[in-house]
Structure formats: C-alpha cells, structure tokens
C-alpha cells in the first residue's frame, strides 16, 4: 500500500494535523514536490534530514502563505516587499536577515543568521500552510543528491513510507526549483538559478543582479554541492550527436533524440520535463549512458544547465 493521498479537504485537514503533530508531509509546489515539516518543531525538522539522508548543515526554505508573515520572521525593507508583491506566489526564494530568535528555528536555519523564505504558487501548498497555521520548511522530497521529484509517484519511489503522507497534486508546472536570491546586502545575488529568470529580476529592479557561482567575494549557498541530481548512468552534456550506447535527451531540432525536452525549443517546457526525462533516461536497461543536447544559456536555460552540470559531475 502506498501513502499517496488524493487532494481534497479531508486530506488537507489530516495533513495539517500531521504537520502540527511533528510528522512529515510531501506536498506539491509549482517547482518540485517538497518534504514538509513544521518550521518551529526542531525534531520534525531533524526527521527531514534523516529521511533525505542529507547533510544537516544545509538550511531549509520556509514556505509561507501570507506576505505579511515576513515581518515576523525576517528583517525586511521596501525592496523585499516589492519583490514579494511582484513575484509571489511563485518560484522565487529570499535569503534575509533573521529576526525570529526562537531556538526551535535554529535547525531550519542551520545555525545561520539568515532565514530563507518563499510563497509557493500551488493551491495545495497554500491550503496546507494556511490550515497548519505555521510556516512549513521543505526541501525537495527526494533522497539527498538524487533527481528532484515532479510527481507524487517520484516522491514515493524515492522516500516510500519515510513520509507520513504524500499529497498528489499532479505534475509540477515549473519543474525546476525556485531561484534563490540573497537580499542581505545592497546587491541582489542569485545563489541558485531557478524558476524565475535573472533577466526578469533585473528588469523589475532596474539594476544588475549578480550570480554567486563560486565567487568567494559574494554570498554562497551551502547546499550547492557539485555532485547533485546524480543519475546512475554516466551522463554527458552538450552532446551534439548520439554516440554508441547513449540514450539521447534532445532539445529543439536535435537529431536522433530518444526523447526531446522541447521540440519547439521552449525553455519553460524543457524545464518542466527535465527531471522526469532524466528519470526515464536513467531507467533504460538497453543503454548504459545518457547524453543531453546543448541548452542555451539564457532565461530558464541557466537553471537547467546548472542542474545538468551537477548531474554530469564526476568526483
Ligand atoms: O523550489 C524549491 O525551492 C523547492 C520547493 C520544495 O520549494 N525547495 C528546494 O529546497 O529546492 P532544497 O532544500 O532542496 O534547496 C534549498 C537550497 C539549498 O541548496 C540550501 O543550501 C539553500 O537553498 N539555502 C537555504 N537557506 C539558505 C541560506 N540561508 N543561505 C544560503 N543558501 C541557503
Ligand atoms: Mg533539493
């Protein structure tokens, strides 16, 4: 018997109660499925790390359902609220100076003086947060260093019964994780490329947005380990043609592609298909290698390239 629940009022009520009782709920967001716990329950937060097999120094994103809640959690200013009003609910996460000194939140923040917050654009996620009445911390609902889940079945394959309930909200629309920006200084710094393109931020803010990308003078993200999103099969990126024993994930007009992220060359469509197609490629028994066509380094292409570079990384 699996623990996947259909989304309905009863499911949300049961899940909210489970969150308040210290349990773990996997729920859909517009980006990927999250593995959620009450942010103020350190024991529940610890059980997220245990279920994922994740290094415990990694801080987690708090998911909230009201912009005004930010004031209770973090040091805010006009820039923060302007960004929230423009991009929330949506795939944009803020790293902000922490003001909540509740020690129960220390684990979620991994001992840092910053908190990390976003408002997901998915009705199930918002209903669950509102019903629970607490911020819900959630990393992606998969084992550490494996491909992020974009369906309830993916969550079940990766975490099985280590989670109390998995709420099925269908396939995630965005398909790559949120863009994380550091707002602790006067510069806006992208710590992780994701569902909101850097260009959209620059256009809205009317200023240049920096990308941290290992630059020691800029803020960094402790979770951006090089080996991440690792498929079991050997993985080659920027492949302009298919070689022997390779299953080719194509993009645009790629020839010989076994599957294609977007025949139209649409980066949004490609992002939404990315993790699911990597899974399909990795489950092929008649091939031992995966190759992927080049993806243009613009818009959501930055997030896609960041993910596949990690998937292809060799120790
Ligand atoms: O789309 C998403 O963001 C998904 C859904 C579930 O919301 N969540 C997600 O969480 O991707 P997770 O835990 O897999 O990735 C969060 C990343 C980690 O790499 C972590 O190190 C970084 O955010 N991070 C969190 N708090 C941070 C902080 N205060 N400073 C720097 N990096 C931080
Ligand atoms: Mg993750």
Image (tube, rainbow, N blue to C red):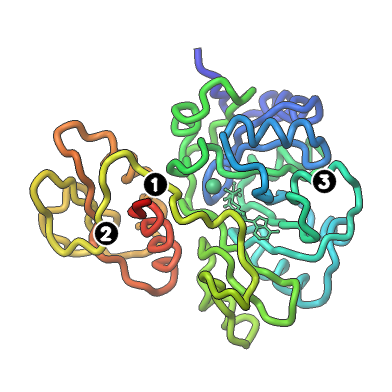
| Residue most extreme to the top | 1
Relative depth, front residue between 112 and 167: 112
> Total number of numbered labels?
3
Residue position for label 3: 105
Q: Is residue 297 above or below residue 282?
A: below
User: Upstream in the sequence, badge 2 or badge 3?
Assistant: 3
SS for callout 1:
helix
Q: Could you give the CA–CA distance between mark 2 and mark 3, rounded to whole angstroms?
A: 39 Å
Q: Would you say the residues marked 3 and 1 are in contact, meaning their CB atoms lie under 8 Å apart?
A: no
Q: Is residue 85 above or below residue 171?
A: below
Q: Would you say the residues marked 2 and 3 are in contact, meaning their CB atoms lie under 8 Å apart?
A: no
Marking on residue 275: 1
SS for callout 2:
loop
Q: Would you say the residues marked 2 and 1 are in contact, meaning their CB atoms lie under 8 Å apart?
A: no
Find residue 230 and report its horizontal and vertical position in percent: 39, 45
Q: Is residue 185 above or below residue 139?
A: below
Residue position for label 2: 237
Q: Is residue 271 left or right of residue 20?
A: left
Q: Residue at x 44, y 72 (%)?
A: 299
Q: Could you give the CA–CA distance between mark 2 and mark 1, rounded to whole angstroms?
A: 15 Å
Q: Is residue 274 left or right of residue 73?
A: left
Q: Residue at x 74, y 46 (%)?
A: 108
Find residue 282 and report its horizontal and vertical position in percent: 29, 39
């Amino acid at each position: 018997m699996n623990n996947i629940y259909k989304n309905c009022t009863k499911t949300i009520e049961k899940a909210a109660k489970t969150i308040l009782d210290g349990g773990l709920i996997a729920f859909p967001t517009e980006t990927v499925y999250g593995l959620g716990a009450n942010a103020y329950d350190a024991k529940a937060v610890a059980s997220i790390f245990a279920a994922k097999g994740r290094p415990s120094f990694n801080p987690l994103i708090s998911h909230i359902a009201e912009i005004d809640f930010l004031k209770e959690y973090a040091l805010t200013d006009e820039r923060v609220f302007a960004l929230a009003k423009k991009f929330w609910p949506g795939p944009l996460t803020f790293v902000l100076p922490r003001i909540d000194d509740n020690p129960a939140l220390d684990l979620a923040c991994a001992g840092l003086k910053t908190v990390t917050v976003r408002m997901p654009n998915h009705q199930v996620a918002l209903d669950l947060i509102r019903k629970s009445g607490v911020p819900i911390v959630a990393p992606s609902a998969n084992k550490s260093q494996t491909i992020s889940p974009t369906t309830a079945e993916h969550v079940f394959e990766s975490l099985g019964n280590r989670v109390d309930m998995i709420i099925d909200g269908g396939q995630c629309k965005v398909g790559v994780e949120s863009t994380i920006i550091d707002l602790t200084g006067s510069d806006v710094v992208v710590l992780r490329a994701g569902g909101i393109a850097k260009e959209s931020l620059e256009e809205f803010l009317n200023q240049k947005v920096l990308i941290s990308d290992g630059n020691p003078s800029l803020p960094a993200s402790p979770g951006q380990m090089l080996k991440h999103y690792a498929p079991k099969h050997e993985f080659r990126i920027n492949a302009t043609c298919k070689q022997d024993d390779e299953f080719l994930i194509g993009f645009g007009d790629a020839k010989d592609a076994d599957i294609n992220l977007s025949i139209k060359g649409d980066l949004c469509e490609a992002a939404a298909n990315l993790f699911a197609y990597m899974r399909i490629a990795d489950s092929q028994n008649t091939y031992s290698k995966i190759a992927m066509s080049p993806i243009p380094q613009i818009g959501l292409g930055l997030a896609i390239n960041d993910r596949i570079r990690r998937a292809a990384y060799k120790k």
